[in-house]
Amino acid sequence: MAYDDLRSFLKALEQHNQLLKIEEQVKAEPDIAAAANATGRISNPDTAPALFFNNVEGFNSAQIVMNTLGSWSNHAIAMGLSAQTSTRAQIDEFIRRWDNYPVAPERREQAPWSENTVDGDDINLFEILPLFRLNDGDGGFYLDKASVVSRDPTDPDHFGKQNVGVYRMQVKGKRKLALQPVPMHDIAIHLNKAEERGEDLPIAITLGNDPIITLMASTPLRYDQSEYEMAGALREKAYPIATAPLTGFDVPWGSEVVIEGVIEGRKREIEGPFGEFTGHYSGGRQMTVIRIDKVSYRTNPIFESLYLGMPWTEIDYLIGPATCVPLYQQLKAEFPEVQAVNAMYTHGLLAIISTKKRYGGFARAVGLRAMTTPHGLGYVKMVIMVDEDVDPFNLPQVMWSISAKVNPKGDLVQLPNMSVLELDPGSEPAGITDKLIIDATTPVAPDDRGHFSQPVKDLPETAKWTEKLNQMLADRAKNQGEQ
């Protein structure tokens, strides 16, 4: 099923018992963030529900939703799959739909967010949005789950170069934000081109979106690939867009709030600190400044935010598959031997890749290529290479490969002074790190190291019995549930 807005997705979550409404009155701080944090600490976080708050102390009519994509169950529902779909099966389906790109979007009129508008000095984000801090050490309020739209100022009519991305934004005033443009991301390229021309960069910030465009905004596509056209492929139906009234940009039709303005050229202010997806605070840095010129919003908008901190949190479920799939597609295009990519850990700072080998040293070449993909340049810091019969999503198999097949004497490849995003707390100086390939594959000719000539393989009948036992256990659980 394709969801055109956040509200239809919330209804679907409720129908699947994946939306928990918190009826008691809560404090904006620390209760909302603490509750979202707790969804990753419950007995089975992979089935954690979304949380809906509508009784928040100090606010008259606040509606706040957290953790909408914060479990594999919710991620599956977002893709129109059964809530019980396994992680690996979800990623396989993601890959299958990826190949349907592009699916042209559908332009619609009368967007829900056009119900109310505020312009210029009348704008006050503190009145429109129920803002709260996510971690104790945060430097202020943050918008951290918005889809930000920008265009290449040198080619503004190129639909594919119009970027939709997720970037953290600190609320600095009634109509002022600070935005962190990571150098590896498209908005940083757009901003650099605008500043070279002595211009501001117009942007549209959309809050409270359907799950698929949020997934796409978190996915490292090629520079000229459209997130809207990929969203259509992923949801298997044309994605609905509308025209933002001030910038004329294409924005999601179903957003709760649309904020338009500019990143002011060559202007920077201190932003941060912020509790980041790395599980560490990022500190204060000079970041870009956004001047807000127009806000459009639904009556009583639902404010969606995302808790992030020590993994796993919602962001890990959100960007995990969105990192695995493009890396897999880029590697598979050049190395057909690649079988699967698991890059779910800290946005791909660690990737596990299974591959066949053409010859000795081949697996290390694949690992090196992963580090030089557009995403890998800024993120892939460590790669574990495993054989084609090892499932990179099965961590016991991966750990067996490392423990039984790695000889540190020759299987560790260290690359000094490579690029990484500045948020990596292990980088020194910030943005520079050594990278590491761990070759846990079986050596093949002409590499004749080790003693791997007599491997133990699964019995031929094991796959059939695995399927049979899974079905028997599922039937038993179903029967017990009906009693």
Image (tube, rainbow, N blue to C red):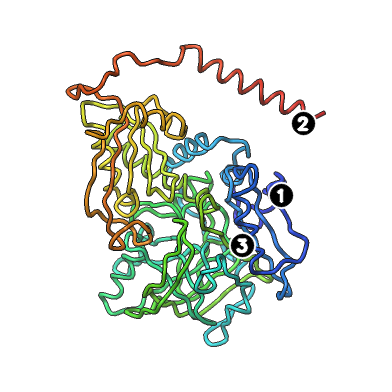
- Measuring 26% from the left and 38% from the top, which residue is drawn there? 412
Q: Give the amino acid at mark 1.
A: Glu
Mark sitting on residue 481: 2
Label 3 with label 2: CB-CB less than 8 Å: no
**Split into 4 quadrants, where in the image is the N terminus?**
top right
User: For residue 304, what is the image quadrant?
Assistant: bottom right
Q: Nearer the viewer, mark 3 or mark 2?
A: 3
- Res 14 label: 1
Crowding around mark 3 (Cα neighbors within 10 Å: few <14, some 14 to 19, many 20+) is: many
Direction from residue 268 to residue 118 in the image, left or right: right
| Helix, strand or loop under label 2 | helix
Q: Nearer the viewer, residue 242 or 13?
A: 13
Q: Is residue 445 above or below residue 376?
A: above
Residue 219: percent from the left, percent from the top? 43, 52
The residue lying toward the viewer, choosing from 382 and 16, is 382
Looking at the image, is mark 2 or mark 1 earlier in the sequence? 1
Q: Position of residue 83 (x, y in %)?
A: 63, 39
What is the secondary structure assignment of the residue under circle 3? Answer: helix
Q: Amino acid at mark 2?
A: Gly
Q: Mark 3 highlights which residue?
A: 33
Q: Which one is closest to the eye, mark 1 or mark 3?
A: 3
For residue 115, above or below residue 36: below
Q: CA distance from mark 1 to mark 3?
A: 21 Å
Q: Depth check: give the residue in front, 249 or 63.
A: 63
Q: For mark 1, give the secondary structure.
A: helix
| 473, 80: nearer the viewer | 473
How far is mark 3 from mark 2, CA to CA?
A: 33 Å
What residue occupies the far left of the structure in this picture? 446
In this picture, residue 293 sits left or right of residue 407: right
